[in-house]
Amino acid sequence: MLLQRLALLVAWVSQLYADAGAALSGDQSSRLRIKWQASIREARLSSNDKGVSPPHPITAGRTTQLLYCRIGIGYHLQILPNGTVGGVHEHTEYSWLKVFAMKQGVVGVQGLKSGLYLCMNRDGVSHGLSLFMADCLFRESLEENHYTTYSSFSYPGFYLALSPRGEARKGGSVSKLQPCTHFLPRSGVQ
Ligand SMILES: *[C@@H]1O[C@H](CO)[C@@H](O)[C@H](O)[C@H]1NC(C)=O
């Protein structure tokens, strides 16, 4: 039953494309092609194990910034050269980050000094990777309290978070209602 329906759908869609191809001017069909390519890109982005390296940000890149987390005594996120992600009270050279938009509301975060991308794996563990892939995409949301949260694009409901001691917390063990997930992006001159 389901297979039959699927076959019908496929037939219908290919007919639609055939009709469209015949009827459309070159300009319109090239627009269709662009749409098609965009949806393929989208599919690649949503696949967890396929690399999407190098990243192609949709913006030229925002200013370098710090991500301040209001948990405990307050920490600046940092990505160390060995891939360790954590927080440090007084920001270091590893706290300067480049946050770039990959699509509307979805960003990548790169440590300026380490060159590593902030990523979260399927266990909710945050770490820095030199290869940009789907695990390195985060939804950036401005919450009602004016703090910003970063949730994994690949694993919805997983949030970037620090512990009261400034260690990275597992993304699946926290909620966006907890201060440990609340960040304040601060731009500045390095
Ligand atoms: C990464 O480097 C930091 C700072 O040098 C160190 O404290 C930490 O133990 C290292 N972590 C690993 C997994 O090597």
Image: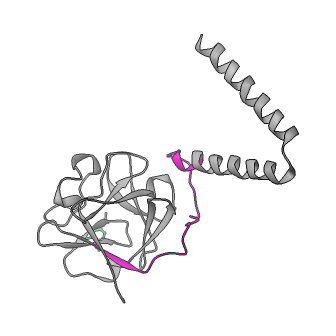
10 relative position to 24: left or right: left
Q: Is residue 53 magenta?
A: yes
Residue furthest out toward the bottom: 189
Main SS of the magenta part reads loop
Which quadrant of the rendered structure holds the N terminus? top right
Residue that appears at 80% across and 48% down: 29
Give percent across and percent down for residue 91: 26, 81
- Ligand 1 shown in quarter: bottom left
Judged left or right of residue 39, residue 113 is left
For the magenta stretch, what is the residue range? 44-67
In the figure, is residue 22 to the left or right of 102?
A: right
Position of 85 relative to 14 (above/below) = below
Compare residues 75 and 35 and report the one nearer the observer: 35
Answer whether residue 46 is magenta in the image.
Answer: yes
In-front residue for pair 110/42: 42
- Quadrant housing the C terminus: bottom left
**Numbered marks: total:** 0
x and y percent of residue 136 in the render?
A: 44, 58
Looking at the picture, the colour scheme in use is one colour
Residue 55: x %, y % from top left: 56, 64
Residue in view at x 88 percent, y 38 percent = 22
Query: Is the residue 88 above or below the residue 39 in the image?
Result: below
Question: Picture quarter containing residue 93?
Answer: bottom left
